[in-house]
Image: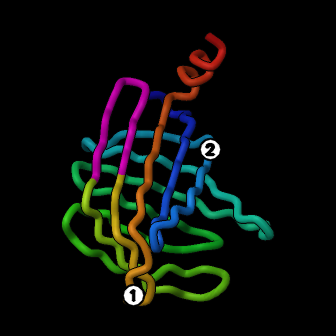
Amino acid sequence: MTKEVLLKIQGMQFMEAEGEPVEVFTAGNYFQKNGKHYIKYDEATEGFQETTQNLIKISGDTMEVTKRGLTNVHMVFQEKKKNLSYYNTPFGNLMVGIEASNIEVKEEPDELEVRVDYTLDINYERLADCTIQMNIQSKGVKEARLLG
């Protein structure tokens, strides 16, 4: 995989049988170190000038998401284990609980596919069953596929 990548991140929250899809397309940077995948990208929030720097670390049955900037959090998605963390936002702080039931990672030379199914708690109350799907592709390969 090249250093420059294109990310497609899709999230779905299921609350009382209704899904709320969220989709993000952005450019980022990728590197691999000690068998772990790292993806870095910046995120803009509507109505704010400050951005949030995101770092995603993937290894085996664990994915970590660290956000720094407008929002701050370190979330750990680990199969069959509940992890708690404080999520600092411009609107206040939340206690976030994440319990992943499934983490799938599919690696190819110029592409990484990730799917995480998890339960989300906010301030110790179950909020939703969620899914995150990510597709990370080498920038040059993605552009060649679009043109070809």
On whether residue 111 falls in the magenta region, the answer is yes
Tag 1 secondary structure: strand
Query: Residue 114: x, y in percent?
Result: 37, 44
| Sequence-first disc among 1 and 2 | 2
- Main secondary structure along the magenta-highlighted residues: strand
| Looking at the image, residue 98 lies above or below residue 109 | below
Q: Residues within 10 Å of mark 2 (few under 14, many from 20)?
A: few
In percent of the image, x 48 and y 28: which residue is there? 2
Name the image quarter holding residue 84. bottom left
Query: Residue 109: x, y in percent?
Result: 36, 24
Q: In which quarter of the image is the N terminus?
A: top left
Q: Along the horizontal axis of the image, is 112 left or right of 68?
A: left
Identity, as a three-letter code, of the amino acid under mark 2: Phe
Tag 2 secondary structure: strand
Q: Residue 23, which numbered label?
A: none
Q: Quadrant of the C terminus?
A: top right
Query: Residue 56: x, y in percent?
Result: 43, 54
The residue identified by callout 2 is 25
C-alpha distance separating marks 1 and 2: 30 Å
Residue 63 or 100: which is nearer the viewer? 100
Q: Residues within 10 Å of mark 1 (few under 14, many from 20)?
A: few
What segment is highlighted magenta in the picture? 103-115
Q: Residue 125, which numbered label?
A: 1
Identity, as a three-letter code, of the amino acid under mark 1: Glu
Q: Along the horizontal axis of the image, is 139 left or right of 131?
A: right
